[in-house]
Image (cartoon, rainbow, N blue to C red):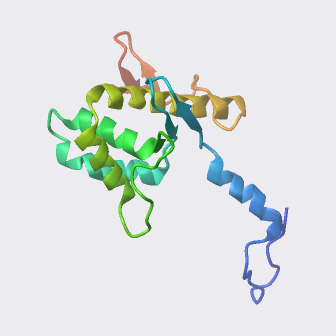
Amino acid sequence: MGELPQTDEETLTTFPEEWKNEFEGLLYLGYLQKEVTSIPFHRFVIRTLTVNDKLEISLLVKPYLETIGYNRAYKSAIVAAGLVSVDGKELVPTSKNTNVLRQKYDYVTDNWYDVVIDFLYRELDQLEEQVIRVLQELGILESPGADTVFVLDGEGNDNPKGGS
C-alpha cells in the first residue's frame, strides 16, 4: 500500500495509483444487481440501493408520512430507486440536471399496479438481504449475536438490553 507524503510541502495532486483498486472496491461493496424474469413476457433488472437513494426516498415519501398511503408510496419509491431497466430499456433517460428518481417514481406510481410494485419490492428486499449474508460470510459484517443492542422479549418486541 502507498505511503502518505512525509512533509507538509508535499501534496498529492492525483489519487495514488496503488490505492485506486482498493478504494474503488468500496464503490461496489454492497452492490448487487439481478435480472428478474418471473413476470411473464417481461425482464426487469434491479440493483441494491445507495445511501443517497435511501435519503431521496425519505424525501419523496415524506408527504405521505402520517397517511394510510405511506406504505404504498414507500414501496413504490424503493422499486423506482432499485430499477435499472425494464425489458432492456431505462424508464427515463439519465441526466445530471434532473431528479431521475423522482421521474422514475412518478412513472411507477402513475402507470403500475400494486401487484407489480409489491413483487419487485420483495425481489429488492431479498437482494438487500443477500448483501448482508455475503458480507457476513466474508467476515466484513458480524452476524447478529450476543453483543446486539436489542433483545427480543417474550412477545417478540425489540427492547434495549437492560432497559425498558
Q: Foreground residue, 118 or 161?
A: 118
Residue 35 at x, y percent in the picture? 55, 33
Q: Is residue 52 above or below residue 126?
A: below
Residue at 34 percent across and 11 percent down: it is 155
Residue at 81 percent across and 69 percent down: it is 17
Q: Foreground residue, 124 or 9?
A: 124
Q: Is residue 102 above or below residue 74?
A: below
Q: Is residue 133 above or below residue 27?
A: above
Q: Quadrant of residue 159?
A: top left
Relative horizontal placement of residue 60, taking residue 137 as reference (left or right): left
- What is the total number of numbered labels drawn onto the structure image? 0
Quadrant in the picture for the N terminus: bottom right
| Residue found at the far bottom of this picture | 9
Residue 106 at x, y percent in the picture? 27, 49
| Residue found at the far top of this picture | 154
Q: Is residue 19 above or below residue 77?
A: below
| Residue found at the far left of this picture | 67
Q: Quadrant of residue 118?
A: top left
Quadrant in the picture for the C terminus: top left
Q: Quadrant of residue 97?
A: bottom left
Relative horizontal placement of residue 102, taking residue 1 as reference (left or right): left
Relative horizontal placement of residue 88, taking residue 100 as reference (left or right): right
| Residue found at the far front of this picture | 41
Residue 21 at x, y percent in the picture? 77, 58
Residue 9 at x, y percent in the picture? 76, 90
Q: Foreground residue, 55 or 161?
A: 55
Residue at 51 percent across and 38 percent down: it is 45
